[in-house]
Every structure is written in C-alpha cells, then in structure tokens.
Amino acid sequence: MTKSLPYDRVLVVASHPDDEVLGCGATVSRLARQGVAVRFLILGEGITSRQQERNRNEVQEELSRLIADAERAAEVVGAESVEVLDFPDNRFDSVPLLDVVKAIDERKKQFNPDLLITHFENDLNIDHGITYRAALTTARPVPNEGVKTFLSFEVPSSTEYQAGMGQKFTPNFYIEVEEQDVERKVQAMESYRSERRGRPHPRAPESIRALALWRGSNIGAQYAEAFSLIRAIS
C-alpha cells in the first residue's frame, strides 16, 4: 500500500469517547503514518447517562479517567490532539442543536480540515444522529468552505442495532488499511478501560479485527474501514 490519501487535515467528530476509535481508528492510523494532521473532537462526556439524573460532581473521577483514556487512544493511533467537550451523555436532544453546531464550527474554523468524518445519521444512539446533523450543518458547501469530503462511519454496537428504523448503513467509500493499523485500532480501544468488552460483543478485539477483514473482503483487500460518502468536491 504505497498510495497516499489525498488529505492534509482531518477532523473526526464523535459523540462519545471510543466512537472515534471504533468508527475510523485504523484509517487515522494510516493517515498519521502518511503525515496527515488528524484531530479528534468528542462532544459528549460519556459517563452521566448511567445516572438517573445527570450530576457531573458525583462522577468527576470517572470523567477524568475517561479523558485520560481518550488521550491515550489518540496517541496510539497517531492523532495529533483530542478534545472532549461536556455535552450530556445520551442526552444531546436536551440541548439546542445550534449549541452543538457552534461547538463543532468553532473547532473547525480553527483547524480548517479538508476531510470531516463523523457518525452515520441513522444510528440507534440518539447522540450519533444529532452529531451527524450538527457536523453536516457546519460543512455546508458555501464559498470558501474548506471541507471538500464528508464521510460518515459505522460504530459497532450502535450502527448495526438500528433494525427496523429505516435507512441502513450502506457503505460506498472504503479506505484500505494494513494489519498494523487494525492492531493500533484494537490497542486504542483497549485503552478505554471502562469500555472494553469481550466476545461476542461487537467491540471485542476479535470483533474489531473481523469487521476489518470483512470490510477488506468487500473491496478485494486484506483490511479496510467502510464509510458512507455524503459529499465530495473536487
């Protein structure tokens, strides 16, 4: 695999810590090896949905640990930075969509990415769909918009859980990756101490490797990650 991917700056916008790794961790590894600048923007804090009522003070230690895990995961796959915001976990529908749009837009303007990657619009998780809508809003094809390619990814344990909910994830854009990229994705996911799962969970290391093999087989390659191409401007 010698061909370079045609991007200079990539912004990955995810709802929760670990979504960024599950969605495109191997692709980020390949991009980083190529010298592309990749930043992770994670909108939600990823913890408080486990409470009956949201109370950040009660879970401050867990939140700090999760942010540390996100930083470690970003380092493993080669992202240059990760920022975790404070939108309420699995309660994005409780805040105005405009607030989510502005949070993404502020970081996007600072970085000026040419590729933006985020969630599939019809995931089961409500935060994922809101993140997609907000990210798409920030990347409207207006004059001087820097984002030329907009992709959405699949997240194991959410995207495939959308049975009976309408449009299914049907990839039409694949990025071939190498075994080392898949292993970095697995290692990054294992950095999330509170999110690790064993077989047969979709987030288990064996499942992550199997999905990379399956997506590779879709395009006659050893390994790949799959995306839905929302827009490409050339």
Image: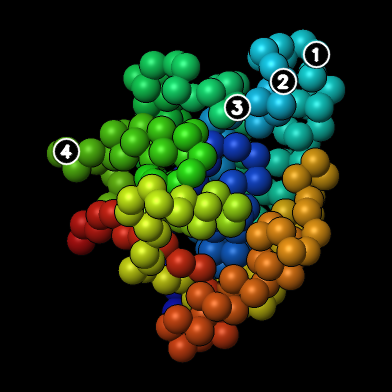
Identified by mark 2, the residue type is Gln
Residue 66 % position (x, y): 76, 34
The Cα atoms of the two marked residues, 4 and 2, are separated by 41 Å
User: Is disc 1 placed on a helix, strand or loop?
Assistant: helix
- State whether residue 149 appears in this view: no
The Cα atoms of the two marked residues, 4 and 1, are separated by 43 Å
Residue contact at pointers 2 and 1, CB within 8 angstroms: yes
Look at mark 4 in the image and give the residue it sits on: 142
Find residue 140 and report its image quarter.
Answer: top left
Find residue 28 and report its image quarter.
Answer: bottom right
Identify the residue at image location x=72%, y=49%.
73
Q: Nearer the viewer, mark 3 or mark 2?
A: 2
Q: Nearer the viewer, mark 4 or mark 2?
A: 2
Q: Is residue 65 above or below residue 26?
A: above
User: Is disc 3 placed on a helix, strand or loop?
Assistant: loop
User: Is disc 4 placed on a helix, strand or loop?
Assistant: loop
Identified by mark 1, the residue type is Glu
Look at mark 1 in the image and give the residue it sits on: 58
Look at mark 2 in the image and give the residue it sits on: 51
Q: Nearer the viewer, residue 139 or 5?
A: 139
User: On the rendered image, what quadrant is the C terminus found in?
Assistant: bottom left
Circle 1 Cα neighbour tier, 10 Å, few/some/many (<14 / 14–19 / ≥20): few
The mark nearer the N terminus, 2 or 1, is: 2
Residue contact at pointers 4 and 3, CB within 8 angstroms: no
Circle 2 Cα neighbour tier, 10 Å, few/some/many (<14 / 14–19 / ≥20): few
Q: Nearer the viewer, residue 122 or 233?
A: 122
Identify the residue at image location x=31%, y=47%.
147
Specify whether 82 is left or right of 5. Answer: right
